[in-house]
Image: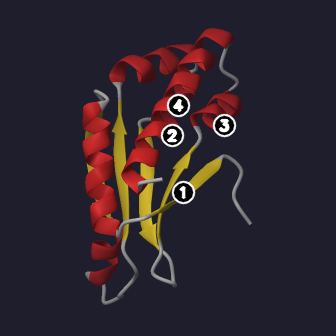
Amino acid sequence: MIPEGLVTAASRSGPGETMDRLKAEIAVRGMRVFACIDHAAGAAEVGSSPRPTALLIFGNAKAGTLLMQAVQAIGIDLPLKALVWQDEAGETWVSYNDPLWIAKRHGLNEKAEMAARAMAAALQAVTSAATGL
């Protein structure tokens, strides 16, 4: 079952290369990486050996601020996030919350929804380039 609003794309590369390509594509498009959280490394610190799973937090202040001016509580969903993860079969995936779903969740006005559409297009392009698909 796919959670509502979640977009997931297969990658042709492993988790490390996919994450590197994702970071590079984000930079090329003028967005900023705020943090990268390595969930697998954190789990390893407590004796678990999970599959590679890392969360990239990134965005563009200009676009995000417009959305937050419309509905301040949208800050719970911003900045944008992408999860690079490997499944049981060794396949690599990138998952993210669709900005249009985020806009719908918060009931954005038409002007702010247009910004969310631009964010969705940029995120889809970044993901496509990072996954090689």
Give whichever of discs 4 and 3 has the lower sequence position. Answer: 3
The reply to whether discs 3 and 2 touch (Cβ–Cβ < 8 Å) is: no
Q: Residue furthest right?
A: 1
Closer to the observer: label 4 or label 3? Answer: 4
Q: Nearer the viewer, residue 89 or 36?
A: 89
* Relative height, residue 99 to residue 18 (above, below): above
What residue would you read off at disc 2? Answer: 124
Which residue is rendered at x = 41% and y = 41% of the image? 126
Give whichever of discs 1 and 2 has the lower sequence position. Answer: 1
The reply to whether discs 4 and 1 touch (Cβ–Cβ < 8 Å) is: no
Give whichever of discs 4 and 1 has the lower sequence position. Answer: 1
Image coordinates for residue 3, horizontal then vertical, percent:
69, 57
Give whichever of discs 3 and 2 has the lower sequence position. Answer: 3
* Relative height, residue 36 to residue 73 (above, below): below
Closer to the observer: label 1 or label 3? Answer: 1
Image coordinates for residue 101, horizontal then vertical, percent:
66, 37
Type of the residue with mark 2: Gln
What residue would you read off at disc 4? Answer: 121
Q: Nearer the viewer, residue 55 or 87?
A: 87
Type of the residue with mark 3: Trp
What residue would you read off at disc 1? Answer: 9
Q: Quarter holding the N terminus?
A: bottom right
The reply to whether discs 2 and 4 touch (Cβ–Cβ < 8 Å) is: yes
Type of the residue with mark 1: Ala
Image coordinates for residue 54, horizontal then vertical, percent:
36, 63
